[in-house]
Image (tube, rainbow, N blue to C red):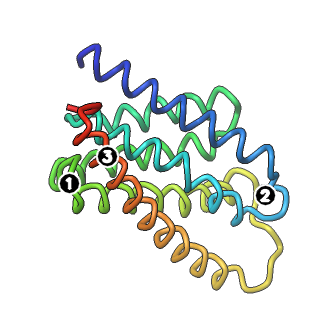
Amino acid sequence: MNRRLLIYSSIFSVASFGVAAVMSLSLSLYALSVFLDPILTLTIPLIIISVGIQLINEKNGPLLVGLISALLYGLFFLLFLSATFLVVGVVVEAVSRKVGYRGFKAVMVNTTLAGGLAGVLSVVFGFIFLGIPAVHELPLLTLAFSLLYFGESAIMGVISNNIGKFLIKSGVIK
């Protein structure tokens, strides 16, 4: 593992974590429903991670970003999110080795997969760690929000790809 990989992974993980924390705490959607918080955190924090993976553009980038993110969430005792980012990091790393890290297809697949899985797994691990809420139609809600998470992540993938293309064309990312 080289120094550049570690520095960039750390920077983008911390930036995404910080933005997610501020957004979550300022709107407190988690207090309304376990389903609502991922909708918020799958916007700017996901774009930051996606652009970071494009910038890193090498093996073990997504894995290290997932690991650092998991450690950050674990430090704040959000173990269900820590477990989520461990799984997402491993899955996105495996997939990105097949599709790559840059280009429309790679960014769309990686971002949609990362965001969709993070949304779904945070709810599932939230249920496991915090208990299942007494909500009627829980399976239907889970399915509907899962589709929403993947759809929203795909939109963030388009935005991330455009930002990444701009940064590459302008010479910021090489």
Q: Quadrant of the C terminus?
A: top left
Q: Nearer the viewer, residue 49 or 30?
A: 49
Residue 164, above or below 14:
below
Q: Residue at x 23, y 32 (%)?
A: 171
Q: Quick check: 52 left or right of 21?
A: left
Q: Which residue is mark 3?
A: 164
Q: Quadrant of the N terminus?
A: top left
User: Mark 1 or 3, which is nearer the eye?
Assistant: 3
Where residue 146 sits, quadrant-wise, is: bottom right
Residue 158, above or below 136:
above
Q: Secondary structure at mark 2?
A: helix
User: Mark 1 or 2, which is nearer the eye?
Assistant: 1
Please state which amino acid type lies under the numbered disc 1: Gly
Q: Which residue is mark 2?
A: 29
Q: Residue at x 47, y 73 (%)?
A: 151
> What's the distance in space between the residues labelled 1 and 2, CA to CA?
33 Å
Among the two numbered marks 1 and 3 on one chain, the one whose residue lies closer to the N terminus? 1
Q: Which residue is mark 1?
A: 103
